[in-house]
Amino acid sequence: MKRIVNEMKLRLPARSQNESVCRSAISAFCSELDPTVEELGDIRLAVSEAVTNAIVHAYRELPMGEVGYVYISARLYDTREVSVEISDNGCGIENVDEAMKPAFTTGSSDRCGMGFLVMENFTDQLTVRSKVGRGTTVLMRKFLKP
Ligand SMILES: Nc1ncnc2c1ncn2[C@@H]1O[C@H](COP(=O)(O)OP(=O)(O)OP(=O)(O)O)[C@@H](O)[C@H]1O
Ligand SMILES: [Mg+2]
């Protein structure tokens, strides 16, 4: 049975300034397991994509002046596993399979629809759950080298 070494929960307003806050927080949190520079870079990148999605897409229908939140919950296990869950209470995704396809985007022309692909390629396990009108949860796991 794997055991939890440490856990963290964060709730941040969905503002673009908080992308870097999340990256820094997850780096500091994982450092206890002494990840390689590459492993840490992978985690930072994947978390960053999920958080950016919550900030950019989840609350796009929110009336001006109202603020949504991004929730980050992370755990370290004694098996050198890192799990990170990023969730929002936003608009949700109508078709998750389609949204996860490379180059699919509902965003503006500066989006390339590569976020999910990056999350998939830089973690060991990715699960996306979403309900229209309720929100989205992205769970990722990374198994660090012994
Ligand atoms: N948290 C979310 N809430 C609502 N919709 C989302 C969320 N995350 C992703 N999506 C939907 O899934 C699509 C694909 O996401 P993905 O991250 O792969 O690409 P992108 O964000 O559009 O572009 P990029 O990440 O390359 O800038 C988005 O365009 C959006 O429609
Ligand atoms: Mg994205």
Image (cartoon, grey):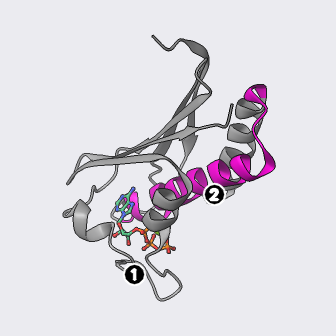
| Front-lying residue, 121 or 55 | 121
For this view, does 109 lie left or right of residue 105?
right
Specify the amino acid type for callout 1: Ala
Q: Residues within 10 Å of mark 2 (few under 14, many from 20)?
A: some
Q: Are marks 2 and 1 in contact (CB under 8 Å)?
A: no
Q: Position of residue 13 (x, y in %)?
A: 55, 46
Task: Say if 102 sits above or below 139 in the image.
Answer: below
Task: Say if 117 sits above or below 86 in the image.
Answer: below
Q: Position of residue 49 (x, y in %)?
A: 54, 60
Q: Position of residue 67 (x, y in %)?
A: 47, 50
Task: Say whether residue 6 is magenta.
Answer: no
Ligand 1 is within 8 Å of the C-beta of the residue at disc 1: no
Specify the amino acid type for callout 2: Leu
Q: Secondary structure at mark 2?
A: helix
Give whichever of discs 2 and 1 has the lower sequence position. Answer: 2
Residue labelled with disc 2:
45
Read off the magenta span: 32-60
**Which residue is found at the position 45% from the left and 10% from the top?**
1
For this view, does 92 lie left or right of residue 32?
left
Residue labelled with disc 1:
103
Q: Secondary structure at mark 1?
A: loop
Quarter of the picture containing the C terminus is: top right
Task: Say if 3 sits above or below 30 in the image.
Answer: above
**Which residue is found at the position 39% from the left and 65% from the top?**
60
| Front-lying residue, 84 or 15 | 84
**Which residue is found at the position 75% from the left and 38% from the top?**
35
Q: Which mark is residue 120?
A: none
Task: Say if 31 sits above or below 48 in the image.
Answer: above
